[in-house]
Structures are given as structure tokens and as C-alpha cells.
Amino acid sequence: MFERYTEKARRVIFFARYEASEFGSPYIESEHLLLGFLREGKALSARVLSAPSFAVDNIRKEIENHTTVGKKIPTSVDLPLTKECQNILRHASGEADRLGHKHIGTEHILAGILLEQDCYAARLLNEHGVSLETVHSGIEEEPTKELAQAKSPGIPAGYQWKTLLYNPPSESIVVEMARTEGHLTLSRLFTRHIAAEVYERVGDPPNDVSYESLVTCEEQPIVIFNSTKWEGGGGNNDGVYLFNLLTRELTLCIGRDTLNIPEPYHRSWVLSLVSLSDDGQLLYLKAGMLPDTGGVVDYYLASLTLANKKLQLLSRLKDIRF
């Protein structure tokens, strides 16, 4: 669910879960998300939450006075998000989409809290003079910069760490790096042997194509990744590629509309890759499926046999952000 979130945004969720357990709450409430944000979103807090009263300890005391503090809950116990918190995260995703940001950062979560106007955390922010307009201004002036800047040899300046994988057969590290151009984030793949220092780039994609969502396996020296072409204000699937880490050969594995898909669908495309079987023959992915009758697109977790491009639908997905 949180694959689109920056590392800092994920830690906000982690700290929110911790705060809920400290308060003895069986659910993660909006106020726990706010406390998680205050722990992690320090740079943004300094810009838009500048009042002295917005220290974590002060906010904690206000929340303690507002709620009944129960017995601490062990961290091993799963704590679900309340409906309000689910709405907040949906608002955060919507804010990132509205601004054309590929990643969801702490600033989007803060805006999401304020958009859920009736929740306690939003009322608390409003009482301290924090408005949605102020947060919007901060986000639009400075898009999210929460991915760690890369400094490794072979990776050009301006790229940020996103994903790292290891392929045992080739003893290779493969990383997905992101570069932000305006409100558009493009990804590139780089690889190196574990004994080397310098990374080499995988392929030579055009400036409007992003290589992303990579997977690898235990038995074959390969990495498979999705390709997205950004055009007309949106992203379209540009195919799935296979890269041999030993021969350095890059091949198109799945082209546009070349999948062998089941009825009643007549068109399908790959949203992102999930995992690859150990032998490198079976790919798991998220797919968009368009019925013969047109209309609403269905989303599925699916498996794909690479030899015959046959797609098997495993489970319907209600939320494509999973």
C-alpha cells in the first residue's frame, strides 16, 4: 500500500502506529498521524508549523487531555487505520496526483490531514493557525525532496535513491534512481558488481520514458522492469523489459497490448511489477483490464508466464495504490 511513499512518509506511518500503541489505542487515529508527522517532518514543520506551541511535547499534552490514555499495546499487535486516517491517506495521494508528484511525501500527508476537516488533528492544526492554503503554498513552492541524494560513482548528479535489489547469480546490485524535472519524476536503473565501485546505466531510454518497478530472482542473472512513457499529461505503459546482468543484453519482454488475456477483457496493460519466480519464468504484476463492453477499468494482481505471455488473474484490487 505504501510503495509510492517516500521513506520519510513511511516513517510517519510507523511513528503514528507507535504513538497509537503508546496511547493504548486499538486504532491509528488522526492525532497519531499528526504526532508521527511532527516526529519526522521537521523541515516542513519549521516552515509551516512555526508557532512555539507546536513542539511535540505540547501537542502530546493537548492530545492526552482530549483522549483517554489506556494500557500500552505491544508493537507486535496489528493496529488498523481508522476511516478518517484512510481518508487522510487518500487525500495525500490525491494531493500528489494534483501536483504531478510521483511520490507521496510528508507534506502531502499534512495536507491530507487538513483536507479531512472534521478530524481532531485538523481541528488542532486550525486552532494553532495552520491552514490548508499555507501548506499548499509550501508544497507548490518546493516539491518533495525526501529521497536521499545519490553520491555513488557512475550515477549522475541530481538522481535520488529509490529502490535497491541484489541478484545472486550475477553478484550484482541493481538500483532504481529518480530524478525530478518540474513536477515529473523519471526513473533510471543502474547496476554494478558487488566488488566494483562504479555503477553502469541500464539501457538508454528517451527523456520522456521512465524505467521503474524492477524485480529479480534467485536462479537467473536477470532483472525485469516496467517502462512508462509520459505523454499528454499522463503516463502510459511502454512495455516490460528484461536485462541480462552478465551479457548486458536488453530485450523487450512484453510489448504494448501483446498479452494473452482472459475473457471478458479485450485489452490489458501493466501497472507495476510485484515479484519474479526463482527460475525467472513466472512474473507477478498489477494489471489494468478493460472489459469488452468498455467503461470502468478493473485492476488485478496477476501472474504472467513469460514463455507464452499468458495472463492469469489472481485477485481483484480495489485500490490500485496497493
Image (spheres, rainbow, N blue to C red):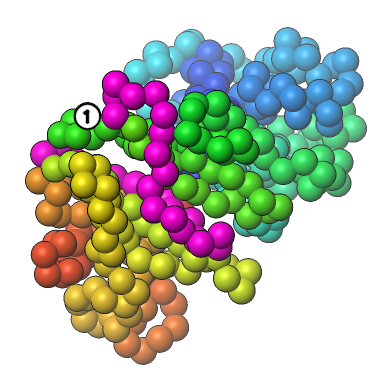
Q: Is residue 255 left or right of residue 12?
A: left
Q: Nearer the viewer, residue 91 or 6?
A: 6
Examine the rendering and report whether any part of residue 65 can be seen: no
Question: Which residues make up the magenta segment?
Answer: 193-219
Question: Which residue is found at the position 12% from the left and 69% from the top?
Answer: 308
Residue 8 visible: yes
Regarding mark 1 in the picture, which secondary structure is present there?
A: loop
Determine the residue positioned at 75% across, 29% down. Answer: 44
Q: Residue 51 colored magenta?
A: no
Q: Which image quadrant for residue 143?
A: top right
| Residue designated by label 1 | 171
Residue 147 falls left or right of residue 249: right
Q: Is residue 244 left or right of residue 13?
A: left
Please state the horizontal and vertical placement of residue 296, each as a whole percent of the image.
44, 77
Give 88 or 248, whichever is nearer the viewer. 248
Residue type at the position of mark 1:
Glu
Tell me residue 228's x, y (percent): 46, 62
Image height of 181 relative to 233, above or below: above
The N terminus appears in which quarter of the rendering?
A: top left
Q: Quadrant of residue 88?
A: top right
Q: Residues within 10 Å of mark 1 (few under 14, many from 20)?
A: some
Question: Where does the image place residue 321, in percent across and percent down from the top left?
Answer: 46, 52
Decide whether residue 208 is among the magenta residues: yes
Single out the residue that lies furthest toward the bottom.
293
Q: Looking at the picture, how far across and down is residue 16, in whole percent?
A: 56, 25
Name the residue: 72% across, 22% down.
Answer: 42
In this image, 230 relative to 316: left or right?
Answer: right
- Nearer to me, 254 or 42: 254
In this rendering, the count of numbered labels is 1
Q: Residue at x 44, y 55 (%)?
A: 204
In the rendered image, the vertical position of residue 179 relative to residue 129, given as above or below: below
